[in-house]
Image (cartoon, helix red, strand yellow):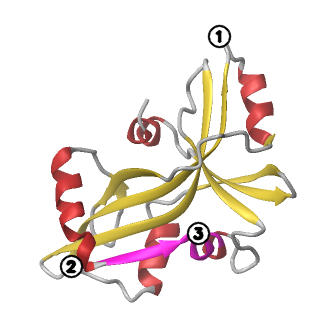
């Protein structure tokens, strides 16, 4: 299942984790879309339109924790396949690049490029809900993959409502062409 499918099916596949040495401990679910983290950071950057903008992990965590955390104390994790009964795949968000397009002076859609890192993977023939909850509640990163992973998504709508949009080659092509402007 893709990240987009997870976003559409799950209410919140994003989670804030506390770093306890080598162990990550689940603190709370986080909503990035809507009037939440990405929207708030866009506002703090003076609502850039028809230009690229960037938010890093420290900015995201500071926004979520109201200034009480940073990338040294917390991680922002995506549970890539929250409804899988065979595997758990957790990725850490490192950066988000965005380009907010305008229509009639208002934001209309915002393609996003997430830079991610694989942090935890576990698979079994059949995972019970209880075992999944126990494994994602507290874990030690176990991934051997240290390469960056990039995922393209977008937010659609104006200032009164940002929702996750679809994923497709046209959106990826438009966004990649604008990377030089960031």
Query: Mark 1 near mark 2, Cβ–Cβ under 8 Å?
Result: no
- Which secondary structure lies at badge 3? helix
Look at 66% across and 11% down and name the residue there: 126
Residue 166 as seen in the image, left or right of residue 24: left
How crowded is the residue under tag 2: few (<14 C-alpha within 10 Å), some, or many (20+)?
Answer: some
In the drawing, what numbered circle is on residue 125?
A: 1
Residue 57 tag number:
3
Q: Earlier in the sequence, mark 2 or mark 3?
A: 2
Q: Residue at x 27, y 70 (%)?
A: 179
| Residue farthest along the left direction in this orientation | 104
Distance from the alpha carbon under mark 2 to that under mark 3: 23 Å
- Which residue is rendered at x = 68% and y = 59% of the image? 75
Q: Position of residue 119 (x, y in %)?
A: 65, 45
Give coordinates of residue 70: x percent, y percent. 71, 73
Which span of residues is magenta-colored? 51-61
Residue 36 versus residue 66 in the image, above or below: above
């Amino acid at each position: 299942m893709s990240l987009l499918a997870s976003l559409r099916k799950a209410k919140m596949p994003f989670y804030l984790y506390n770093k306890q040495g080598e162990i990550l401990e689940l603190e709370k679910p986080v909503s990035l879309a809507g009037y939440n983290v990405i929207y708030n950071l866009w506002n703090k950057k003076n609502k850039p339109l028809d230009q690229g903008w960037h938010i890093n992990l420290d900015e995201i965590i500071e926004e979520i924790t109201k200034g009480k955390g940073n990338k040294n104390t917390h991680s922002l994790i995506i549970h890539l396949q929250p409804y899988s009964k065979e595997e758990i795949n957790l990725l850490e968000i490192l950066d988000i690049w965005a380009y907010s397009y305008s229509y009639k002076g208002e934001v209309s859609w915002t393609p996003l490029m997430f830079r991610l890192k694989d942090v935890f993977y576990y698979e079994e023939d059949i995972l019970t809900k209880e075992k999944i909850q126990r494994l994602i509640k507290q874990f030690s990163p176990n991934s051997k993959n240290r390469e960056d992973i990039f995922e393209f998504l977008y937010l659609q709508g104006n200032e009164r409502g940002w929702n996750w949009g679809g994923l497709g080659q046209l959106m990826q092509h438009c966004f990649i062409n604008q990377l030089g402007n960031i």
